[in-house]
Amino acid sequence: MPVISARQLTKSYGPQTLFEGISLTIGREDRVGLLGINGTGKSTLLRVLVGAETLDSGTIERRRDSSLLYLSQEPKLDPNLTPRQIVESGLGEWKRAMDRYAELGHAIAASSAPGALLEEQACLLDRIEHLGGWDQGHRVDDMLGKLSVLSPDSPVGPMSGGEQRRVALAHLLVARPSLAVLDEPTNHLDADTIDWLEDYLTNSYQGAVLVVTHDRYFLDAVCSRIFELDRGQLFEYQGNYSSYLEQKSERLAHEERTEQNRANLLRRERAWLQRGAKARSTKQKARIQRAEELIANEPDRAPGTVQFNAFELDAKKGGKHLLTFDGVSLSLGGRKLIDTLTLHLTSGERLGILGPNGAGKTSLLKLLTGELKPDSGGVRLAAQTRVALFDQARAGLRDDWSIFDNVAERAGAEREGAGVVQFGDRTFELRTYLEHFLFEGSKQRQPVGALSGGERARVALAKMLKTSANLLLLDEPTNDLDVSTLSALEELLETFSGSALIVSHDRGFLDRVVSSLLVFEGDGRVVHYPGNYSTYRSLRAAADQERQAAVKATAATPAKASVAASGTATPAAAVSVKPLSNAEKKELDGLMDRVTAAEERVYALQAELADPNFYATRGSEAASKQRELELANQQVVNLMQRWEELEARKSLKR
């Protein structure tokens, strides 16, 4: 029996019908992704299914013994409670089941006919096992740690929206509902935590999952079915996101063929009518009726897609070097975020910024906007550098202004109907410009405060892109964007002649867009890696393997020790080490030159891979170049290890 079954659901807001007559079922172990462009009603459908919004018509049935929990984009938490208290409340069902199980034990012992009680106890036993077994207290601390909730015993009231979302997600996962309904769960999670959540939902979570997310890697890894809201209807696809793309392509091709056949038939019927067909016979009447039906049944227009590239952003006047970090250090609240960072950003480079929440990624962008000053070192922008910021809070938008006024950056601009946007030699009227962002006609008069998260993101993008900046600062740009808009933004950045600094945890976005990564690794260490996210992961995995191999090698050669008669250990005997041979002395003399040459080879390969033109003209060589870089890095490590070994034996005498 499915966990939830919905039939003929219809929901409207005023004249706008979000969906009409849709039906769906979700089984006990289903992993379902819900897709659709912004504004189609995905979040509304989730709220309807969990009972947070009413239906216009339709029925929803839930399995009687099932539980359902919902992670909204803006969860409402008691501000006086701590994360620990909130997450512990997720064990409420488990605790009630445990208490009832104990009560039944006493009742069964005292009953002469315990049949029904034993049956209830057996059901409770299954439920307790489903909820995680008999010892669950440790799961609270573990879940808080996995989701990087750093102050578990402080009230949640002063915490950021992202921190509160992680607390709400921890509560839901600890509770283990029969159906977890998740609205953009990867927002405000770092890449490593998203990896963990993928693995947990795929391999450990026992209930069903219904998720709205823009993260294509997440959809590919977790989901086994895809629902898509499209023009008020719900379409279902079997398989993950990759399978969905293939199946949707086939569906659209079929729709195109069907519409072409309909158009051809309509053209013939119209021609027949125009020849003056008389409705005398039954056959003629039927043909006229069929023609009228073809005319009346015009299919819904397919939803538009954002077309950023129509603007042909011109950012060629910034010179070669747009930005320089020269030995920059920054501390906040007693924590060292950045320690002596030196970096040159060249025109055309797209630099991804990656790291755990709170590591300092947004603070780095604030150094560029002047909101923060470095403790030491300098941040220099070239004279012709023009900066535009897309912040994750969309703080630059006025909720009480219309879409038009926000992008025009002037109250009352929409009433006047004035405004143009200039891109090189091309000029767009502001109304036409906004239509490229899917804001047509009366929609442009709508207050921004009434928009969905994805629509707000499109307004912020429209406002940013019209500035003709040559250095874009993008702080979590993918949050709330639908896949269609996300793809359009990727295409824009791939062809953008200026530069971009992009804070993002969207692994697919980083893989497709960036030419190098700046990774916050803790204690102020900020490391520049060549290539995209997958390249970084492979380099990090190789480094982890080297460290593990070194630990195993050390453990395999234990120091020799003697044990006194009293049973206490004496100091370890010195391991026998030979002094340098003549050949080894000669080797040591030339080692630093070899290290320098190996490092220069690494730098040359990194520069080659960081050049955006490399991927445009020689993309097929990327994999082999990455392997070459890995080997060059390994050669530096090996040479340094050899130098340390020989240097340690240098002072020994024969």
Image (cartoon, grey):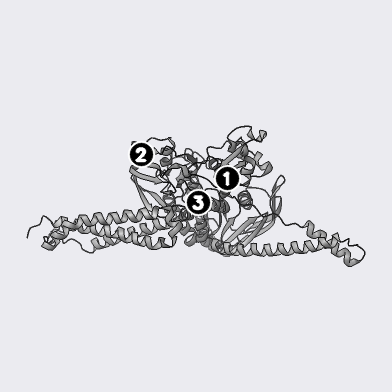
Residue 495's tag is 3
Does residue 558 appear left or right of residue 427 in this picture?
left
Query: Which quadrant: the N terminus?
Result: bottom right
Q: Crowding at label 1, few (<14), some or many (≥20) Cα neighbours within 10 Å? A: many
- Give the alpha-carbon distance from disc 3 to disc 1, as whole Å: 19 Å
SS at mark 2?
Answer: strand
Q: Amino acid at mark 2?
A: Leu
**What residue is pinned by disc 1?**
458
Which residue is farthest right? 280
Q: Crowding at label 3, few (<14), some or many (≥20) Cα neighbours within 10 Å? A: some
Q: Amino acid at mark 1?
A: Arg
- Give the alpha-carbon distance from disc 1 to disc 2, as whole Å: 32 Å
Q: Residue at x 25, y 60 (%)?
A: 638
Between residue 150 and residue 214, name the one nearer to us: 214
Q: Comparing marks 1 and 2, which lies closer to the viewer? A: 1
Q: Amino acid at mark 3?
A: Thr
Between residue 195 and residue 429, name the one nearer to us: 429
Does residue 614 appear left or right of residue 489 in this picture?
left
**What residue is pinned by disc 2?**
330
Q: Crowding at label 2, few (<14), some or many (≥20) Cα neighbours within 10 Å? A: many
* Res. 186 in view: no
SS at mark 1?
Answer: helix
Q: Comparing marks 3 and 1, which lies closer to the viewer? A: 3
Relative to residue 397, is residue 263 depicted above or below?
Answer: below
Provide residue 522's location: percent of width, then percent of height: 35, 47
- Callout 1 touching callout 2 (CB < 8 Å): no
Does residue 450 appear left or right of residue 568 in this picture?
right
Which residue is farthest front? 425
- Give the alpha-carbon distance from disc 2 to disc 3, as whole Å: 33 Å
Q: How many marks?
A: 3
Q: Residue at x 68, y 43 (%)?
A: 441
Provide residue 116's location: percent of width, then percent of height: 59, 63
